[in-house]
Image (cartoon, rainbow, N blue to C red):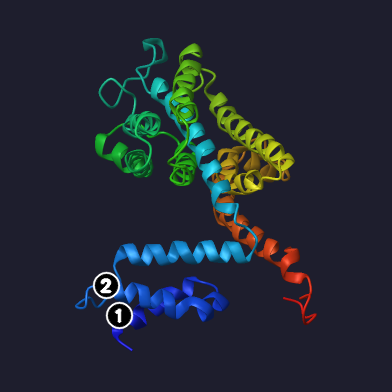
Amino acid sequence: MTALERRYRRLLRAYPADYRRDRGDEIIGTYLDLADPARRWPSAADAADLARGGLRQRLRAAGATDLIPGVRLAGLLALTTATFLAGFWTVVEQQPPAEWGLLPGFGPFVSAGVVAWFGWLVAALLAAVTPGRPSRSAVALAVLATAAVPALCVIAGSPRPPLLVLVPQVALGVLALTVDDHLPLPIRALPITAAVAGGTVAWADANAAYWGADRGSIEQLLPAAGAVLLAVAVLLAVGLAIQRDGRGKWAVAALLTPVGLLSVHILAGMVDGLSGATHPTYPTLVATALVVGLIGPSVLPAAVALRRRTDPRRTSPCPTCGTHR
């Protein structure tokens, strides 16, 4: 066995064991026939292809073939929510009224966070005009820019948007990377429409939700966005379930992490409320965000495992020999 074949067989572990036994030699033989004779390592494209194929076969074996379409549906909802918030924050970042005593710290804007918000607006536009790799790359860049905002603000010497705002935006963006590339134009236009709607809401509120006397309302905006996101996902899940389409339930499971991060202030308030505190403390906010960030992503694998255990095709006896498969 050559080193290249051995490395391909390691990658083949992405497939279920029974599938490897039945078709492993055939798959490896195909890759070896197409590989350059001088190659010693599998290409990145081959490794990604084996990983995708293995995931599809494992989901098929678990009876969860609708998981990937469901996650893509969640990605669309996440992108729409992220661009709504980006449109809102873009307007908020503009110079506030002078009577509030705040000076812009990044050109005509308050903070360097506007770099990330502009990135999201570009991603929303590209999602409508050029779906696929260009829009996905724009979303990835927007996620990276959002994660880099604290460092950018330190370098620019400007105020920093609260982590309460930045962390859920990153979570929404990671999920938005899964958006389907072949959506019809009216669906692809949802993110840019949401961005315009978010900007309109901020403009109508005259920035009071962030810089004015009613600044505390920012703690209501994010949970409200999370509640709307979850409600839309649940309604879609119910409607699709009526049509015997399982995408909706997977979309709801995938959205639990960003919804939880959008609602961190409320969840932390519930925890601190047990001790009589009127407002959540910073340590409780951090701990709650960490718990949501750790538990949330485990929901999908747990649901797949449960589906595998309860799949009637796996528990019904074989009509020939009577054994349980």
- Residue 243: in sight, yes or no? yes
Say which mark, if any, is on residue 4: 1
Residue at 22% x, 73% y: name it.
36
Where residue 179 appears, as percent x and y from the top left, is 46, 42
Residue at 58% x, 47% y: name it.
70
Say which mark, if any, is on residue 35: 2
Q: Left or right? Give the position of 234 relative to 289.
A: right
Q: Secondary structure at mark 1?
A: helix
Q: Residue furthest bottom?
A: 1
- Does 142 sit above or below residue 66? above
Q: Residue furthest left?
A: 38
**Marks 2 and 1: CB-CB under 8 Å?**
yes
Mark 2 → mark 1, Cα distance in angstroms: 9 Å
Residue at 38% x, 37% y: name it.
131
Q: Secondary structure at mark 2?
A: loop
Where residue 82 appears, as percent x and y from the top left, is 47, 34
- Does 109 sit above or below residue 12? above
Q: Where on the picture, by quarter, is residue 211?
A: top left
For the C terminus, the image quarter is bottom right
The type of residue carrying mark 1 is Leu
In primary-sequence order, the first of circles 2 and 1 is 1
The type of residue carrying mark 2 is Ala
Front residue (pair 154, 74): 74
Q: Left or right? Give the position of 238 relative to 202.
A: right
